[in-house]
Amino acid sequence: IGAREIVAIFISYAGVVVISTRGAPLTLAFSNGPGVALALGSTVIWALYWIYNTRDEHDPVVGLFLNFVFALPFIFIACAVFSAPWPASAYGFAGAAYVGVFEMGITFIFWLKAMRLTYSTARISTLIFFSPFLSLVFISALVGEVIRVSTIAGLILIVAGNLLQQTAAHRP
């Protein structure tokens, strides 16, 4: 990792700090400290997961399925220890099913297929930068949630850091 890529990572994480402090990054007063820690920790885990899986020569869809099947007993154990083993309401179960099927399953399969079908992975990989902004549009339009200016500013920093990293990765 070069200096430019390290700067890009810090810019992206600065965007996360702006969002999670609701626009007051110098205070470091997070809206939900444990939640922010878990979210940041998950970014590191996901990064390591994708880096490791670039070396895997097996079918990625089968690998994704096996990862979820392997994780299922651990999820049940964690739920039994820390909460109820099943969601308290049908809404909770529907939300968990939605995240599992659409956000973690089908979308990953589409992404993997797109990566295999494209002639330029660099070009298609930049499409992911539209996702946070589209999510904001959907959240605002469908859920009616007010989007803070700090959220938009933070997303701009995150995307800027990612774009800087992309240009750093393609420099000779």
Image (cartoon, rainbow, N blue to C red):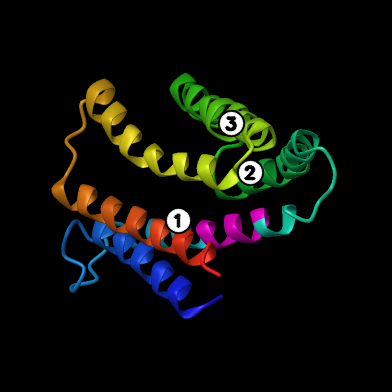
Q: Which segment is the magenta one?
A: 42-50
Instruction: Give SS at disc 1.
Output: helix
**Disc number lying in front (1 or 2):** 1
Query: Which is more N-terminal, label 2 or label 1?
Result: 1
What secondary structure characterizes most of the magenta part? Answer: helix
**Number of residues whose C-alpha sits closer than 10 Å to that of mark 3, classed few (under 14), some (14–19) or many (20 or more):** few
Task: Specify whether residue 100 is in view.
Answer: yes
Give me the residue at 61% from left, 36% from top: 85
**Cα–Cα span, label 1 and label 3:** 17 Å
**Cα–Cα span, label 1 and label 2:** 22 Å
Q: In what quadrant of the picture does the N terminus appear?
A: bottom right
**Disc number lying in front (3 or 2):** 3
Q: Is residue 24 above or below residue 6?
A: above
**Amino acid on which the number 2 mark rests in the picture:** Ala
Q: Is residue 44 above or below residue 73?
A: below
Q: Residue 153, position in %: x, y?
A: 21, 53
Query: Which is more N-terminal, label 2 or label 3?
Result: 2
Task: Specify whether residue 31 is in view.
Answer: no
Q: Residue 162, position in %: x, y?
A: 42, 57
- For disc 1, the marked residue is 39
Does residue 112 appear left or right of residue 22 in this picture?
right
**Amino acid on which the number 1 mark rests in the picture:** Ala
- For disc 2, the marked residue is 80
